[in-house]
Amino acid sequence: MPGVPDTGDTAWMMTATALVLLMTPGLALFYGGMVRSQSVLNMMMMSFGSIGLVGVLWVLYGYSMAFGTSVGDAGLVGDPTEFAGLSAIATGFSGDEVPLVATIPSVVFAAFQATFAIITVALISGAVADRMKFGSWLIFAGIWASIVYFPVSHWVFAFDDTTAGAGGWIANDLAAIDFAGGTAVHINAGIAALVLAIVLGKRRGWPREPMRPHNLTLVMLGAALLWFGWFGFNAGSAVGSGAISGFAFLNTIVATAAAMIAWLLVERFRDGHPTSLGAASGVVAGLVSITPACSSVSPVGAIAVGAVAGVLCALAVGLKFRFGFDDSLDVVGVHLVGGLVGTLLVGFLATAEAPAGVDGLFYGGGADQLWRQAVGALAVLAYSGIVTAIIAYALKFTIGLRISDENEVTGIDETEHAETGYDFSTLRGGGGLGTSRPAASEPVPATAGKES
């Protein structure tokens, strides 16, 4: 609807949008540090490629599919032509009134939601590290965003008062609570990652050969940037700068802290050593789990959500060895499991004293909210899993999904991008500034060594 935007809310939402966009480069560092050194650039390029591709598709038709008026009465997808190119909301700036969503300009809301679409696609890439063609990844990402993420975001995020007409079925008819994307983002990406990893196949040598993270410093930096950006992700989902955003902000802190401690305790008792990789993974597990619940549980409830997620995700990452699927960077164990934990715990731990105003099972609300949460989670899981399998197999039997065995041995950075993350041939010698040792491929001068 046209109106005069609230400047405070608008300023916060533009800040939140920048924070969420920063999460994808943060994810690139997080994932990049976890792979082997010959794969770091490809891993980071998969995240950056998602920014470029999904950002463009969102403007062309993605926003319209997500937040346009539902086609038909089922609430399955928005009209892809209603806001195509965003021309319908990026006009009318000659006066004081502009198209609004809540109290902010519609263009700001569209930009905020674009960053959600970008990082959801980028999350999937962690499951296919070291072995997927970059071109095939971009084609998969574009198709998956178009027929999986855009419709699912309509189901979950398109409330009737944020669309031009009728919104999505999970948000309005089912009334499941997903404040910032436990279903639409994490369950959606997590099950897609599992299916794509299975269709793609295992890395050469996995699980016999150790495939350790090559740079834990990058992993810790990436986790820190994710935590920082997640305040925009969760608190920004209030679409304003009031008490609800502050409530989500606090819960994002405490749930993440609890999950990190819980993960480290599991490592200490199971393996004998708490690790930096475990701390970083626990941070992400806590962020994932509190995402759907941050408006519906108390701060103590948020601690419980984080603690449960920290324990269960730490245990779940080992399931890939038991069941034999090569989820390279534990997208399934952290995002799918963490998303399910946070979504379902709303049905147990929600309290009417929180902004969402709903009581869960432990607060006298019975199982009403719990079954709604379960149906929403299972619907997203089933739709995303089935459609991802169709896309993956179609690409596998046409253009192919993975690089050759020879290229995998050589390293995907060199074969796909003609680059290396660490060029040691340019290291200088000890003779001071301006002197260096000849590269191995360069001829050694006849006078080399005679000066001394």
Image (cartoon, grey):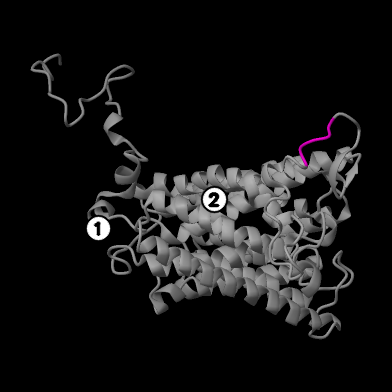
Which type of secondary structure does the marked residue at label 1 adopt?
Answer: helix
Residue at image mark 1: 405
Mark 2 or mark 1: which comes first in sequence?
2
Q: Position of residue 171 (x, y in %)?
A: 77, 67
| Left or right: 339 in relation to 442 | right
Compared to residue 280, the image places residue 422 above or below, namely: above
Compared to residue 276, the image places residue 303 above or below, namely: below
Q: Is residue 92 magenta?
A: yes
Q: Which mark is residue 27?
A: 2
Image quarter in which the C terminus is found: top left
Q: Amino acid at mark 2?
A: Leu
Compared to residue 210, the image places residue 215 above or below, namely: above
Res 258 visible: no
The residues colored magenta run: 89-93
Quarter of the rendering containing residue 106: top right
Residue at 39%, 68% (x, y): give it: 199
Residue at 58%, 56% (x, y): give it: 146
Residue in the foreground of this view, choosing between 422 and 3: 3
Q: Position of residue 237 (x, y in %)?
A: 76, 54
Whole-angstrom CA distance, mark 2 to mark 1, is 27 Å
Which type of secondary structure does the marked residue at label 2 adopt?
Answer: helix
Q: Position of residue 345 (x, y in %)?
A: 71, 75
Q: Amino acid at mark 1?
A: Asp
